[in-house]
Image (tube, helix red, strand yellow):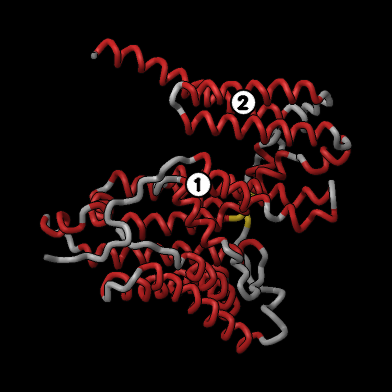
């Protein structure tokens, strides 16, 4: 039996490696056809794409289904994208595919999602489903703009946004934890409440004029690396909250997986009865986790209003809270993987803004690209995500 296991193990490892190699080949099938390489021969794209599909088929045959199908999808996408690039004008390609600008925009589009996903991680690791991220982000967007306006300071706007998010988190925790309401229903109610409150206050305070043009904004951080190729274009000038989001990914990982507080948080989401037996207050832990979740999600909304577009409009979050939740599931409730998912969506958003150069009439269709990428990633490439064991279950004491 030991010999059989030892015989199978290398085969499974080889299958996974083949799957990863196929993903890389699929990426190369597209990459070689765009700047800076700009290979104009469809044959090169086709060979690389078919090699990716072949590697994926080998991986599937070896039992590495997730890696294999990922390689097959990457090969197919690489062939389609690469072939389209070879048939496009070089001028258009060099206008659209500017890697420094694309990657910088990717970080900007991913930042509000990263805040939302990190917020959702705290709540759901404690056992409370939080589909209210959308409403919490919207509250943060409005109260961040309003706070910056009345205090004439972006710091005041951030502080008021954090408080607003914490209050919305407290309301969600009250129903989900204390009253043991259905957490999906509670989260949906929070989303509707946020739409109503922010819409009413926006009209009542600003009317038809909208938020002021001179709304204080979160400043950019300028690094002295502008002369460094690519890195200077990407990191030379980024908003302060982009750096905060990246730092919080590391902080969240340390707190959740390397501290006693994180252990208590995870135990509340995995086995709350055992945690209570050990002396942990699961109710208090969940309240704090959901309020932290609301504050972080609101910070993502504040980035949109006073860090990105420097204004507020009704429903400006536009589904980003739900995408953040999808990124959290994509990342299997781990901060680093969730960040990778938000970067995927951010890249799709950044690319979608530039694709109308090829076809102005398809501009609306291109806006669906980030959502399609997210859907493919979550349903087709991630595999089965295992949620915290007690997620969505109110604490039932015997």
Q: Residue most toward the bottom?
A: 204
Q: Residue at the spot x=54%, y=44% of the render?
A: 377
Relative to residue 130, is residue 256 depicted above or below? above
Disc 2 crowd rating (10 Å Cα; few below 14, some 14-19, many 20+) is many
Residue 397 against residue 5 in the figure, above or below: below
Residue drawn at point x = 50 percent, y = 48 percent = 246
Position above or below: 367 against 9:
below
Quadrant location, the C terminus: bottom left
Judging by the rendered image, the residue that carries numbered circle 2 is: 53
Q: Is residue 131 found left or right of 257 in the rendered image?
A: right
- Looking at the image, residue 150 lies above or below residue 29: below
Is residue 380 among what the camera can see?
yes
> Badges 1 and 2: C-beta atoms under 8 Å apart?
no
- Check disc 1: other Cα within 10 Å, few if <14, some if 14-19, many if 20+: many
Q: CA distance from mark 1 to mark 2?
A: 27 Å
Residue at x-position 44% and y-position 76%? 189
Q: Where, by quadrant of the figure, is residue 224 drawn? A: top right
Which element type, helix, strand or loop, lies under badge 1?
helix
Instruction: Give how far across and how far down residue 129 sits, in percent.
Output: 37, 62
Give coordinates of residue 345: x percent, y percent: 60, 49
In this rendered view, identify the residue nearer to me: 73 or 116: 73
């Amino acid at each position: 039996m030991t010999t059989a296991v030892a015989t199978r193990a290398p085969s499974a490892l080889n299958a996974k490696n083949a799957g990863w190699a196929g993903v890389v080949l699929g990426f190369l099938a597209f990459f070689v056809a765009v700047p800076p390489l700009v290979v104009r021969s469809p044959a090169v794209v086709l060979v690389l794409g078919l090699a990716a599909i072949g590697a994926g088929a080998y991986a599937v045959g070896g039992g590495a289904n997730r890696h294999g199908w990922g390689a097959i999808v990457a090969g197919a996408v690489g062939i389609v994208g690469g072939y389209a690039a070879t048939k496009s004008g070089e001028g258009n390609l060099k206008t659209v595919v500017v890697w420094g600008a694309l990657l910088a925009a990717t970080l900007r589009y991913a930042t509000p999602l990263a805040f939302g996903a990190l917020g959702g991680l705290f709540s759901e690791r404690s056992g409370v489903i939080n589909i209210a991220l959308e409403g919490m982000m919207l509250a943060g967007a409005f109260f961040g703009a309003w706070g910056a306006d009345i205090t004439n300071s972006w710091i005041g706007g951030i502080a008021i946004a954090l408080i607003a998010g914490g209050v919305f988190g407290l309301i969600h925790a009250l129903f989900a934890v204390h009253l043991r309401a259905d957490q999906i229903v509670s989260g949906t109610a929070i989303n509707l409440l946020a739409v109503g409150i922010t819409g009413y206050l926006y009209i009542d305070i600003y009317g038809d004029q909208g938020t002021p043009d001179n709304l204080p904004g979160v400043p950019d951080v300028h690094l002295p690396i502008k002369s460094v190729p690519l890195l200077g274009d990407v990191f030379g000038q980024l908003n302060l909250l982009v750096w905060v989001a990246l730092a919080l990914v590391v902080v969240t990982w340390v707190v959740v997986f390397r501290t006693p507080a994180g252990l208590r948080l995870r135990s509340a989401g995995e086995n709350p009865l055992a945690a209570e037996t050990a002396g942990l207050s699961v109710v208090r832990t969940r309240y704090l986790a959901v309020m932290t979740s609301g504050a972080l999600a609101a910070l993502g909304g504040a980035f949109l209003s006073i860090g990105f577009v420097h204004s507020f409009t009704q429903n400006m979050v536009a589904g980003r809270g739900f995408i953040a939740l999808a990124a959290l599931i994509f990342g299997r409730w781990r901060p680093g993987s969730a960040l990778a998912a938000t970067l995927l969506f951010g890249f799709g958003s950044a690319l979608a803004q530039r694709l109308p150069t090829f076809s102005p009439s398809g501009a609306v269709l291109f806006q669906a690209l980030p959502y399609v990428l997210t859907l493919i990633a979550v349903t087709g490439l991630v595999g089965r995500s295992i949620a915290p064991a007690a997620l969505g279950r109110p604490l039932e004491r015997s």
